[in-house]
Amino acid sequence: MSFHHKNNHRWIVTLNHTQARIYQGFEKEAGYQLVTIHDFSKGHHKVPHGKEASTKDSQKRFIHSLANDLLKASSTGKFQSLVLVAPHQVLGLLRSELAPVVKQ
């Protein structure tokens, strides 16, 4: 059994407009395990008056929620390095929401 410091964790986030999958691995070791799935379709997508929110607004909330979760994980030392894999447009949206400490 090998000992891993918390700062050796690397997270890989793969995402598109509807889902993000977060995988965790250790530097210098092969293989990653699925940590969690953020699913856009399972979120709350209604505005207060019961009208359906636009898909674009819902996607922004999805990306914002993911960025907040990544900030919390970074702040608690759950990963040292982060790799983002996404289509250009989605990656741009996520990067605009990420806190500076997560971008480092």
Image: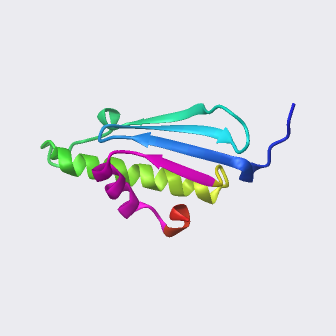
The answer to whether one can see residue 83 in this image is yes
The residue positioned 33% from the left and 57% from the top of the image is 92
Q: Is residue 25 above or below residue 63?
A: above
Judge left or right: residue 102 versus residue 87.
right
Judge left or right: residue 5 versus residue 20.
right
The answer to whether one can see residue 47 in this image is no
Residue 8, x across and y down, in percent: 73, 49
Work out whether residue 12 or residue 6 is closer to the camera in this orientation and state it: 12
Quadrant in which residue 14 is drawn: top left
Residue 52, x across and y down, in percent: 14, 42
Residue 98, x across and y down, in percent: 44, 61
The residue positioned 46% from the left and 55% from the top of the image is 68
Colour scheme employed for the rendering of this structure: rainbow
Could you tell me which quadrant the N terminus lies in?
top right
The residue positioned 39% from the left and 60% from the top of the image is 95
For the record, the magenta segment spans: 81-99
Quadrant in which residue 4 is drawn: top right
Judge left or right: residue 70 versus residue 55.
right
Could you tell me which quadrant the C terminus lies in?
bottom right
